[in-house]
């Protein structure tokens, strides 16, 4: 079920009313309802893969008890069993074909023949997210941050909570499980805040991202016949499309969770206002980057075991992060580019320059230096996005090369924008809204009149265009 | 909790009202571009680098299923669409895509100039070339069309994917067997009386020339077609209308690829009422047949 679809618009109020009015007599009943609703939400996409979700959840639930064992060897054994189990599921469904084809290609270079058996199954939606939830749970138990949960329903709610089930944020057991096990009471302010987030997320997805998707899809598909300026505009458009799409999804997820009394981890903090790549990664897909930091980078030694290891670990985390997105060299290259952008900051010990502050923190507008830094970071990120979006490595390289054709020097062509792209200017209110709340991303204090305009604009787009039932980009991961 | 639900419901209610109010100018804005948003988006989404277009008014709209002409062919006609709008649509699509061929109907509607005196006098606003030349001019008809299409969309929202198909669905006979007989000879006579006094081929529609020049410049093949009319109507035209002869002459002068289906009896039984929605519009069952024949003729 998609957030931006009519079934969800019916599903959410029904579950909300049942949750607070019918099942509110006990915490367990509420959790059972949330679990049932989550499985229904998932099965709406494909009931066949629901079994895989339940099986994965159940196995990690069992492993949790083994990992909690006082015997360190037994504990470690179950930890690795869980890791193998989760990575095995991911490996089979997400990476098997990729590796099989790589082997075939390598063997072919040796003038030998290898005909691999390929899997012809769809990638189960949300698999990268719920397997990471499971691993987060056993890691936290292993580190003593979390005790194994005795009630399967509680644990299953943590893994399968419908707002975050298919595209995150990737929650930590130590953060979400206590909320699952604690009695929740309706909080008016929290619910209103949730509605605001849902509204803003819908606007970003339906109005901005799906409108920009039209030019992006066309340009990336037909880049060899497009002029340089069109490709440049499309690359910039994709930067905003993926931001509107994914941060829109995250906003809706956070907002929906708030309606049920949960506070999820923040996933975005206005990444395009970043002044360097390090800051960008503290603001983009935060739940994933912090997951890799806590469960991969730090266990590998982080930056505390000498410069060489810090560089090695940086590359590992970025390459793995790229590979997490999909079984393609494009994503690995995308991660590699970001690692290269991060490297100078690491070597100059400037990777933690902007940790706590926000741009133009005590001012209304950024100064020239900040503006330059933001622009440079945005250009860097946009170039990397081309590798993320293009269907293949050679396509990405050709796309970038074609930008620098003669047409890029003819500004008059920039004015020839097809009418259906005019709504692209709606990135301006999106950025304006983000800029206004850049210091406190969790609280969009949207005035009622502005909220009504945003709501009406979203509904008009929803009804009058094809911008509904359009899948989220991160669903494919 | 109750306060929350009441306030959210009130917010949604007011928001939907506001959305309804915004919907009309939004649509008009797109109609100002003369290319329905949904059709633009269908082309944008399907994203072939080369497309072909069916243009024209209700005659094309109700007669041609573009799917028979190839996956990249789109029916961009709509009821009451003028040649001027055809030109704008073609220009708009050609700005982002290579256009392979167009199907351009040559109908009486394209050349109405004296409607002021006719029963359908209000239509003069639709076919007034001079006023249509000004892009800022919004016809009353635009409001009518916007309201009509908005009504159709509201009735179907959430389910539609293809503007053309939906409007045909709205007619109720897109995928149904042809069982209803809606056209009678009396309709033909009445339609003839309505239309014949309005024709004047001495005032040639300048936008035909614009389209021809545009297509010649871009290497776009133009297929001119005349649609079948029901027997009674056709006979009336052929027997009593000097405009018909002028039209045939005009066609000859153009020396362009043309398909005159007016006389066809092989595939459309012009004396069978259920093949016609009314005197001069094909019905859904003949749309299928006609589209196949058109496809064979053009692709040959």
Image (cartoon, coloured by chain):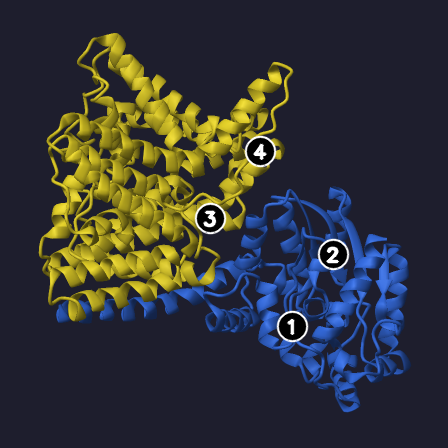
Chain colours: A yellow, B blue
- Chain letter for mark 3: A
- Are the two marked residues, 4 and 3, in contact with CB atoms closer than 8 angstroms? no
Secondary structure under tag 2 reads: helix
Q: Which residue has dot 1 on it? A: B174
Q: Which residue has dot 3 on it? A: A422
- Chain letter for mark 4: A
Name the image quarter holding residue B291.
bottom right
Q: Position of residue B256 (x, y in %)?
A: 86, 54
Number of residues whose C-alpha sits closer than 10 Å to that of mark 1, classed few (under 14), some (14–19) or many (20 or more): many
Secondary structure under tag 4 reads: helix
Q: Residue at x 60, y 24 (%)?
A: A114
In front: label 4 or label 2? 2
Mark 3–mark 1 distance (CA, rounded to whole Å): 33 Å
Q: Which residue has dot 2 on it? A: B69
In front: label 4 or label 3? 4
Judge if badges 2 and 1 mark residues of a common chain.
yes
In front: label 3 or label 1? 1
């Amino acid at each position: 079920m998609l957030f931006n679809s009519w079934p969800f618009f019916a599903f959410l109020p029904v579950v909300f009313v049942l949750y607070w009015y019918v099942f509110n007599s006990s915490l367990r009943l509420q959790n059972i309802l949330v679990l049932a609703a989550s499985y229904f939400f998932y099965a709406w996409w494909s009931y066949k893969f629901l079994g895989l979700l339940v099986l994965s959840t159940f196995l990690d639930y069992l492993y949790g008890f083994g990992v909690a064992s006082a015997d360190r060897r037994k504990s470690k054994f179950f930890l690795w069993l869980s890791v193998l189990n989760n990575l095995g599921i991911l490996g089979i469904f997400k990476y098997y074909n990729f590796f099989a084809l790589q082997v075939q290609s390598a063997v072919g270079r040796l003038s030998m023949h290898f005909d691999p058996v390929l899997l012809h199954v769809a990638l189960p939606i949300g698999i990268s997210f719920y397997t990471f939830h499971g691993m987060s749970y056993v890691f936290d138990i292993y580190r003593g941050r979390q005790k194994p949960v005795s009630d399967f329903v509680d644990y299953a709610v943590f893994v399968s909570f419908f707002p975050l089930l298919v595209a995150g944020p990737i929650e930590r057991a130590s953060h979400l499980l206590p909320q699952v096990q604690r009695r929740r009471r309706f909080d008016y302010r929290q619910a209103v805040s949730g509605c605001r987030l849902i509204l803003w997320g819908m606007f970003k997805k339906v109005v901005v991202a799906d409108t920009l998707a039209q030019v992006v899809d066309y340009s990336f598909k037909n880049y060899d016949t497009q002029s340089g300026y069109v490709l440049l505009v499309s690359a910039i458009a994709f930067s905003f499309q993926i931001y509107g799409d994914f941060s829109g999804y995250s906003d809706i997820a956070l907002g929906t969770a708030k309606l049920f009394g949960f506070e999820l981890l923040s996933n975005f903090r206005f990444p395009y206002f970043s002044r360097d790549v390090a800051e960008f990664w503290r603001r983009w897909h935060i739940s994933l980057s912090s997951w890799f930091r806590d469960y991969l980078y730090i266990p590998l030694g982080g930056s505390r075991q000498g410069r060489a290891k810090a560089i090695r670990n940086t590359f590992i985390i970025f390459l793995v992060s790229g590979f997490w997105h999909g079984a393609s060299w494009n994503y690995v290259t995308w991660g590699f580019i970001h690692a290269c952008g991060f490297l100078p900051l690491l070597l100059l010990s400037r990777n933690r320059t902007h940790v706590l502050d926000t741009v133009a923190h005590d001012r209304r507008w950024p100064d020239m230096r900040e503006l330059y830094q933001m622009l440079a970071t945005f250009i860097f990120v946009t170039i990397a996005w081309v590798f993320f979006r293009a269907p293949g490595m050679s396509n990405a390289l050709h796309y970038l090369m074609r930008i620098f054709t003669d047409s890029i020097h003819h500004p008059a062509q920039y004015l020839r924008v097809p009418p259906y792209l005019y709504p692209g200017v709606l990135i301006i209110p999106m950025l304006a809204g983000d800029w206004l709340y850049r210091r406190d991303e969790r609280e969009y204090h949207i005035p009622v009149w502005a909220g009504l305009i945003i709501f009406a604009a979203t509904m008009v787009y929803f009804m009058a265009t094809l911008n509904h039932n359009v899948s989220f980009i991160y669903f494919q991961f | 909790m109750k306060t929350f639900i009441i306030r959210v419901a009130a917010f949604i209610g007011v928001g939907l009202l506001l959305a309804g109010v915004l919907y009309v100018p939004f649509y008009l804005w797109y109609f100002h571009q003369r290319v329905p948003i949904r059709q633009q988006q269908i082309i944008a989404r399907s994203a072939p680098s080369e497309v072909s277009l069916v243009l024209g008014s209700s005659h094309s709209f109700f007669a041609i299923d573009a799917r028979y002409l190839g996956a990249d062919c789109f029916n961009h006609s709509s009821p009451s669409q003028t040649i001027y709008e055809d030109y704008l649509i073609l220009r708009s699509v050609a700005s982002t895509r290579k256009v392979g061929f167009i199907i351009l109907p040559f109908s009486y509607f394209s050349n109405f100039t004296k409607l002021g005196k006719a029963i359908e006098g209000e239509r003069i606003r639709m076919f007034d070339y001079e006023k249509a030349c000004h892009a800022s001019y919004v016809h009353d008809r635009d409001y009518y069309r916007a309201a009509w299409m908005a009504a159709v969309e509201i009735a179907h929202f959430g389910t539609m994917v293809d503007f053309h198909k939906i409007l045909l669905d709205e007619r109720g006979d897109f995928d149904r067997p042809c069982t209803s007989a809606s056209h009678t000879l009396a309709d033909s006579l009445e339609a003839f009386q309505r239309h014949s006094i309005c024709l004047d081929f001495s005032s040639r529609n300048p936008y035909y020339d614009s389209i021809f020049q545009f297509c010649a410049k871009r290497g776009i093949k133009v297929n001119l077609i005349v649609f079948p009319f029901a027997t009674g109507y056709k006979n009336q035209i052929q027997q009593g209308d000097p405009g018909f002869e002028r039209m045939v002459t005009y066609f000859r002068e153009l020396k362009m690829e043309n398909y005159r289906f007016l006389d066809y009896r092989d595939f459309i039984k012009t004396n069978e009422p259920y093949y016609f929605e009314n005197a001069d519009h094909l019905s859904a069952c003949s749309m299928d047949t006609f589209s196949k024949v058109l496809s064979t003729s053009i692709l040959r």
